[in-house]
Image (spheres, grey):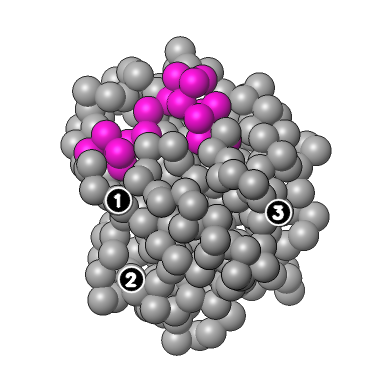
């Protein structure tokens, strides 16, 4: 089973880039796909969403709106049993689906956490945490806009770079990494770090349009619960010449034997 996540940057307004993303997804052929920043995909009776569905072969999907156009979607080759919008009290949409596979019931959560600051993201995770259970087979993925304590940042250099960029997204006097730490403390396993000890950054790309992506950072994650650890075959950030131009984030891919 192949699972993919991609932040497509502001709805992928350029027709040529939209076509490249569709071609890439079709060739990779994930069974479960999470997308974020689906700006305006609900406009004109969901014209953009319908175009995507027409050009791919997903059998089912969920689409959840946010108050600020940061919509998210989950697209599946399987049918799903339940779907939930877990966005109450959150600025950006969060979606959860439950899928009945041959030998397990799998929960998939796609989240896009705030780009504002760590305190806001901590509040968001507190809400999300009410909808996840470490006892269930769960995949929790998305653009978390957060730094991991497992990644080898030069904290003083990164803080200096942030000050020069005029931002405090990751803290002021010190780097803040509480969100990812709380996710791991809740029993979730960082799938990419599980498979690679190298620094697998997810921004910036050659297409990058976001000034917050001023240096190599890992902002996109795929976490799994303990029950999925033994079935994880691979997890990686797909950094290639092709994916360098798809979005301002690189896609994330994981493969399982389930």
> Label 1: how many residues lie within 10 Å, few (<14), some (14-19) or many (20+)?
some
User: Residue 176: x percent and y percent?
Assistant: 58, 41
Q: Secondary structure at mark 2?
A: helix
Kind of element beneath mark 3:
loop
Q: Foreground residue, 85 or 252? A: 252
In which image quadrant can residue 207 be found?
A: bottom left
Q: Which residue is mark 2?
A: 243
**Which residue is disc 1 drawn over?**
199
Q: Nearer the viewer, residue 14 or 168?
A: 168
Give 95 or 249, whichever is nearer the viewer. Answer: 249
Mark 3 lies on residue: 116
Residue 149 drawn in magenta: no
Q: Which residues are magenta?
A: 179-195
**Which tag is nearer the camera, tag 1 or tag 2?**
1
Q: Which residue does the image show at 31% across and 52% down from the upper left?
A: 200
228 with respect to 132 (left or right): left
């Amino acid at each position: 089973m192949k699972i993919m996540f991609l932040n497509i940057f502001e709805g992928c307004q350029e027709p040529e880039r939209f076509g490249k993303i569709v071609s890439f997804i079709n060739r990779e052929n994930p069974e479960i796909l999470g997308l974020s920043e689906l700006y305006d995909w609900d406009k004109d009776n969901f014209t953009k969403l319908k175009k995507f569905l027409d050009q791919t072969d997903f059998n089912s999907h969920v689409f959840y709106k946010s108050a600020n156009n940061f919509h998210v979607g989950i697209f599946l080759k399987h049918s799903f049993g339940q779907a939930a919008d877990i966005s109450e009290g959150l600025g950006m949409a969060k979606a959860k689906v439950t899928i009945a596979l041959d030998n397990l019931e799998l929960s998939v959560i796609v989240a896009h956490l705030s780009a504002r600051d760590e305190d806001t993201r901590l509040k968001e995770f507190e809400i999300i945490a009410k909808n996840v259970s470490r006892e269930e087979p769960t995949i929790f993925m998305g653009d978390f806009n957060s730094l991991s304590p497992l990644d080898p940042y030069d904290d003083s250099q990164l803080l200096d770079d942030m000050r020069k960029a005029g931002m405090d997204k990751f803290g002021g006097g010190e780097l803040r990494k509480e969100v990812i730490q709380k996710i791991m403390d809740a029993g979730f396993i960082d799938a990419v770090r599980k498979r690679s000890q190298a620094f697998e950054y997810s921004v910036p790309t050659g297409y990058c349009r976001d000034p917050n992506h001023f240096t190599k950072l890992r902002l996109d994650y795929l976490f799994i619960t303990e029950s999925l650890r033994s079935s994880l075959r691979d997890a990686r950030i797909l950094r290639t010449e092709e994916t360098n131009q798809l979005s301002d984030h690189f896609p994330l891919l994981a493969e399982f034997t389930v």
